[in-house]
Image (cartoon, helix red, strand yellow):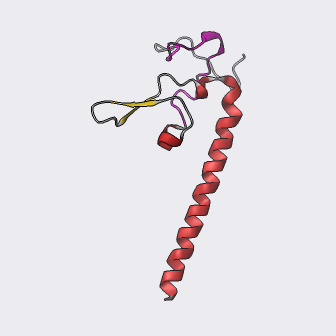
Amino acid sequence: MKNSYKYFENRECAYYPCHEQADPDAFNCLFCYCPLYLLGPKCGGNFKYVGPDQSIKDCSACLFPHRPENYEAILERFRREGRKKAQQDASSAKASEDSKDR
């Protein structure tokens, strides 16, 4: 695949490819750091928690953000999470206003 707004490959990176099981001919570096990481266990990827207290998220077995065909799915997830956050904020604002009226 050719470098574009949906795909970027950096074979000169010291870590390329950063996942051992990855196919270097179909590895997208665009999301070098997974944009879904902060969703924790709700990210939808193949991860596990490691460390003495199981608090470190290990995504080394996950290739979801590195597959070129998943670009649109990641953007849609951003949209969905953004809508959920906006609804939560609106609900919180309404609850705050309702409590002031009492």
The one of 57 and 29 positioned closer to us in this rendering: 57
**How far from the left and from the top, in percent, is residue 56?**
36, 33
Pick whichever, 51 or 4, lies toward us: 51
Residue 78 is situated, as x and y percent measured from the top left of the image, at: 62, 44
Q: Give the quarter of the image for residue 25.
A: top right
Q: Looking at the image, which residue is at 71% across and 35% down?
A: 72
Against 48, is 25 above or below? above
Residue 19 part of the magenta-drawn span = yes
Q: Is 78 located above or below residue 29 in the figure?
A: below
- Picture coordinates of residue 21 (x, y %)? 54, 13
Q: Is residue 66 left or right of residue 102?
A: right
Please tell me which residue is depicted at 50% across the width and 22% down the height of the picture: 61
Secondary structure character of the magenta stretch overall: loop
**Is residue 38 among what the camera can see?**
no
Q: Quadrant of residue 90?
A: bottom right
Q: Whole-percent x and y of residue 13?
A: 50, 14
Please indicate whether residue 91 sits to the left or right of residue 49 in the image: right
Q: Residue furthest bottom?
A: 102
Q: How many marks?
A: 0
Give the residues drawn in magenta, as a range.
16-35
